[in-house]
Image (cartoon, rainbow, N blue to C red):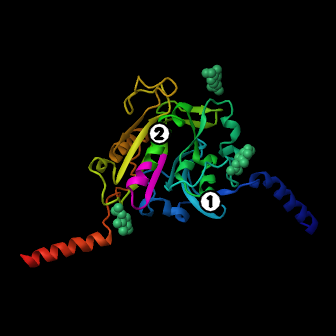
């Protein structure tokens, strides 16, 4: 190829690629999560999910990793996003939706898919659970989004997100790892625009191994780990989440049931047909060094006195 031709060619390629880089670039398509293991408890992604058909994404924005998502190519939506929860600073940012430059429309949801779909764009990692403006903006990528009914998104699921944030602020005295994901329909898949898979349920679990020493008795059930499943279809059966018939009509049928991590993992095992372990069986209280020293000291001095 002549010099001039090569130049033209690369210019052409650049022009073709430009729309994908327009504005915001993030999301790193990689073989695994090795660049963003920090977002998983004990740096261990959930076990039991087959690799085939899924794409690990280290969600990068402005040159920093912000969270991690496992993307299902055929569904054009994530199975889950994993992140570290922190207090939000300031207001929800203006949403500019971003998509991955490495991908093409073929394997990615685009804004058009959501238009006239009657579904809202449901965040798995909600911007409410992120601290800085950049961290919050990074959640506005369609690889972190699923088609969610408005009644769920602005109803009981939003209540759950607020509640988890409150539990973190009030009782967690360390890092809170969260994994939030979806369960597709069991038999026939549902799609928007014949492209993006609609989940039947949303689910979420958190793990906080260091809690405040003054954790009240009635909160002990919710630590170190707890979970929930939310309805995304008011016509679903009630085997996982019962319906409160007294809820106001706009949110009726979009209930969220709180449950233990074990219960959630049982449901996921049943519905996704794989033995999923979200925190790899490891989310347990950890004693701080200070506590261990105090315990050892107490033991020693007690035995000395005896
Ligand atoms: C968000 O967008 C609105 C309207 O475009 C604009 O008035 C506002 O200043 C923006 N806010 C931020 C924080 O960028
Ligand atoms: C959206 O909802 C409206 C009113 O319920 C309905 O007429 C329309 O067919 C729905 N659109 C899609 C794409 O399902
Ligand atoms: C929180 O953790 C810090 C550092 O380990 C410790 O000094 C402090 O006492 C803890 N606070 C509570 C309320 O447990």
Q: Residue at x 65, y 42 (%)?
A: 109
Which residue is rendered at x = 26% and y = 71% of the image? 292
Which residue is the site of mark 2?
159
Residue 99 among those drawn in magenta: no
Quadrant containing the C terminus in the rendered view: bottom left
Q: Residue furthest left?
A: 306
**How many residues crowd mark 2 within 10 Å: few (<14), some (14–19), many (20+)?**
some
Which disc number belongs to residue 93?
none
Task: Tell me where the magenta segment starts and ends, as one range.
Answer: 166-180
Q: Toward the viewer: 264 or 251? A: 251
Q: Which mark is residue 60?
A: 1
* Residue 101 vertical position relative to residue 234 in the rendered view, above or below: below
Element assignment for label 2: helix
User: Mark 2 or mark 1, which has the lower sequence index?
Assistant: 1
Is residue 66 visible in the rendered image? The answer is yes
Q: Look at discs 2 and 1 and give the one toward the viewer.
A: 2
How far, Cα to Cα, is label 2 from label 1?
28 Å
Q: Nearer the viewer, residue 110 or 288?
A: 288
């Amino acid at each position: 190829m002549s010099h001039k031709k090569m130049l033209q060619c690369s210019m052409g390629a650049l022009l073709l690629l430009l729309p994908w880089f327009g504005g915001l670039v993030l999301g790193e398509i990689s073989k695994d999560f090795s660049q963003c293991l920090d977002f998983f408890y004990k740096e261990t992604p959930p076990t039991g999910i087959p690799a085939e058909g899924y794409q690990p994404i280290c969600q990068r924005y402005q040159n920093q990793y912000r969270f991690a998502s496992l993307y299902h190519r055929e569904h054009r939506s994530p199975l889950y996003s994993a992140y570290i929860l922190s207090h939000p600073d300031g207001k929800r940012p203006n949403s500019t939706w971003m998509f991955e430059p490495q991908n093409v429309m073929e394997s990615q949801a685009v804004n058009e898919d959501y238009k006239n779909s009657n579904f809202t764009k449901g965040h798995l990692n909600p911007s409410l659970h992120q601290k800085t403006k950049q961290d919050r903006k990074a959640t506005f990528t369609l690889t972190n989004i699923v088609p969610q009914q408005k009644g769920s998104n602005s109803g009981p699921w939003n209540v759950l997100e607020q509640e988890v944030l409150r539990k973190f602020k009030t009782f967690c005295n360390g890092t809170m790892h969260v994994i939030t994901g979806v369960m597709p329909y069991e038999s026939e898949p549902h799609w928007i625009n014949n492209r993006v898979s609609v989940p039947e349920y949303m689910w979420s679990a958190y793990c906080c191994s260091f809690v405040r020493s003054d954790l009240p008795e009635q909160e002990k059930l919710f630590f170190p780990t707890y979970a929930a499943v939310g309805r995304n279809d008011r016509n679903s059966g009630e085997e996982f989440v019962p319906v409160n018939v007294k809820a106001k009509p706009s949110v009726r049928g979009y209930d969220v049931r709180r449950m233990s991590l074990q219960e959630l993992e049982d449901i996921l095992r049943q519905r996704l047909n794989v033995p999923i372990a979200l925190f790899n069986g490891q989310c347990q209280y950890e004693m701080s060094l200070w506590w261990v020293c105090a315990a050892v000291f107490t033991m020693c001095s007690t035995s000395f006195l005896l």
